[in-house]
Image: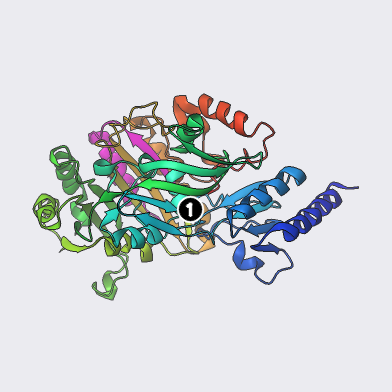
């Protein structure tokens, strides 16, 4: 038989096996739901899998992994489907789709939450905030919990509470042999180490157990907009301020466009602007005083420092990153942020290809750095800053220009960086250099992958959640 015929036969057998065993939906190319089911958040991604196994239960996951082991298709794993590289969907293979497994169960007495692999941070925030508790998550509530956590998990609370992966107490995972395991500090400890920042291709997660922290429902947050012509002065003042701010704040600096918000005149929408932001991880009224210096870095256009509820705070940026738009993100870690690095950031901001594109500097340290370098697979504990170059656009005709801007800006910042790259902001799959992403941990991660997937059933599913 030809290769095409062999693949078609394999796919038919795979679909038949899945339909025999799964409670959830099995969607192949003949299904009217296929076009929608294969889409992910990033509209730049246009891959056509052979079949999508939309798992409804842990037993479905076990059965799907067994089918993958028997038929050996390319495999990808979809949680929230929000990962920038679009790795949740593969070409001509099997998508293990966990997007229906969204349960969140909170134990307020134990301060823990059990979270399904398809949940998004909006689901987690809604459940935990009923009890005034949080998991340190990301910055856009539509982001999937699985992808963010397995890659580390930077967010507004990172200096105060650490990365999302630092809050993990245990992970339930189906490994390539089809066995459901619990990984924690006392069970499968090496696997647990790998899942905290390096959980790529190590299995299919079916539940996360997180430690919860008291915060909310009211929080103080700051978002201050400055004129773009003041960018250099504001950045210099921000760099001077950041070392003096407490770890209860993770200050951010961004060069962006004014959002299409009704609060701004329509003629201002998209105009370049400087954005300075922070969220206070403590009592709200106290936070207003701590955040106040962020509005004194120049003469603001808008000072939106306020007390709001945590759920609203975490979802405020969701409309700015709509599903179906086109995205390409690359990032660097920096140990310091000197004048030359600042000049490179300003130059990148000046060349942004669209109003939706941004350059954002996030502060690190604090609780992130208090976790030992070798205590988890996240390899960038010593970094003091992360600079992300985020291209966003809607017109396919400018794909090359938008991606070229991000890559060029990343190249210009390389001399000031550590050489490390955040796996969640690493460009497309071909951009993600394993040594840059995992540093000295790459060899240990490879050994763990060989232990739990010696035949490479799932190992190719890198960054797929």
- 188 vs 136, nearest the viewer: 188
Residue at horizontal 55%, vertical 43%?
Answer: 173
Find the residue positioned furthest to the front: 109
Q: Residues within 10 Å of mark 1 (few under 14, many from 20)?
A: some
Locate residue 154, reporting x and y percent: 35, 45
**Which of the 4 quarters of the picture holds residue 16?**
bottom right
Residues drawn in magenta: 328-354
Image position of 234 (left or right of 193): left
Can residue 357 be seen by looking at this rendering? Answer: no
Relative to 433, residue 227 above or below: below
Image position of 117 (left or right of 70): left
Residue at horizontal 52%, vertical 59%?
Answer: 101
Asked whether 322 falls inside the magenta stretch, the response is no
The residue carrying mark 1 is: 401
Residue at horizontal 58%, vertical 53%?
Answer: 58
Image position of 2 (left or right of 162): right
**Which of the 4 quarters of the picture holds residue 311?**
bottom left
């Amino acid at each position: 038989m030809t290769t095409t015929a062999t693949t078609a036969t394999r796919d038919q057998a795979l679909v038949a096996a899945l339909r025999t065993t799964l409670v959830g939906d099995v969607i192949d190319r003949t299904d009217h739901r296929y076009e929608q089911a294969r889409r992910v958040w990033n509209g730049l991604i246009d891959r056509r899998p052979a079949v999508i196994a939309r798992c409804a239960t842990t037993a479905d996951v076990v059965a799907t992994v067994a089918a993958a082991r028997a038929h050996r298709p390319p495999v990808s794993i979809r949680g929230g489907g929000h990962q920038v590289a679009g790795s949740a969907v593969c070409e001509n293979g099997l998508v293990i789709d966990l997007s229906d497994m969204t349960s969140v169960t909170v134990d307020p007495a134990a301060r823990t939450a059990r979270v399904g692999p398809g949940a998004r941070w909006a689901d987690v925030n809604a459940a935990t905030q009923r009890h005034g508790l949080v998991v340190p998550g990301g910055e856009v509530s539509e982001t999937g919990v699985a992808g963010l956590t397995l890659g580390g998990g930077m967010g507004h609370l990172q200096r105060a509470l650490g990365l999302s992966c630092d809050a993990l107490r245990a992970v339930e995972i189906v490994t390539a042999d089809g066995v459901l395991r619990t990984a924690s500090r006392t069970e499968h400890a090496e696997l647990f180490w790998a899942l905290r920042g390096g959980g790529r291709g190590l299995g299919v997660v079916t539940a996360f157990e997180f430690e919860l922290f008291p915060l909310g429902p009211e929080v103080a947050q700051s978002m201050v907009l400055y004129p773009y012509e003041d960018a250099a002065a504001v950045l210099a003042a921000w760099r001077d301020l950041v070392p003096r701010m407490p770890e209860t704040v993770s200050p951010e600096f961004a060069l962006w466009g004014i959002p299409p918000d009704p609060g701004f005149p329509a003629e201002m929408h998209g105009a370049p602007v400087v954005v300075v932001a922070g969220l206070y991880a403590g009592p709200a009224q106290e936070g207003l005083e701590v955040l106040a210096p962020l509005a004194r870095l120049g003469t603001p256009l808008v000072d939106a420092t306020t007390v709001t509820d945590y759920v609203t705070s975490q979802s405020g940026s969701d409309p700015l990153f709509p599903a179906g738009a086109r995205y390409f993100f690359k990032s660097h870690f920096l140990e310091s942020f000197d004048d030359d690095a600042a000049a490179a950031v300003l130059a990148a901001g000046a060349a942004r290809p669209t109003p939706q594109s941004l350059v954002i500097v996030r502060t690190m340290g604090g609780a992130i750095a208090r976790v030992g370098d070798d205590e988890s697979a996240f390899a960038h504990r010593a970094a003091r800053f992360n600079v992300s170059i985020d291209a966003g656009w809607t017109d396919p005709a400018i794909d090359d220009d938008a991606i070229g801007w991000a890559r060029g800006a990343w190249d210009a910042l390389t001399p000031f960086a550590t050489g490390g790259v955040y796996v969640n902001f690493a460009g497309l799959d071909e951009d993600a250099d394993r040594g840059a992403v995992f540093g000295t941990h790459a060899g240990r991660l490879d050994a763990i992958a060989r232990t739990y997937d010696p035949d490479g059933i799932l190992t190719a599913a890198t960054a797929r959640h």
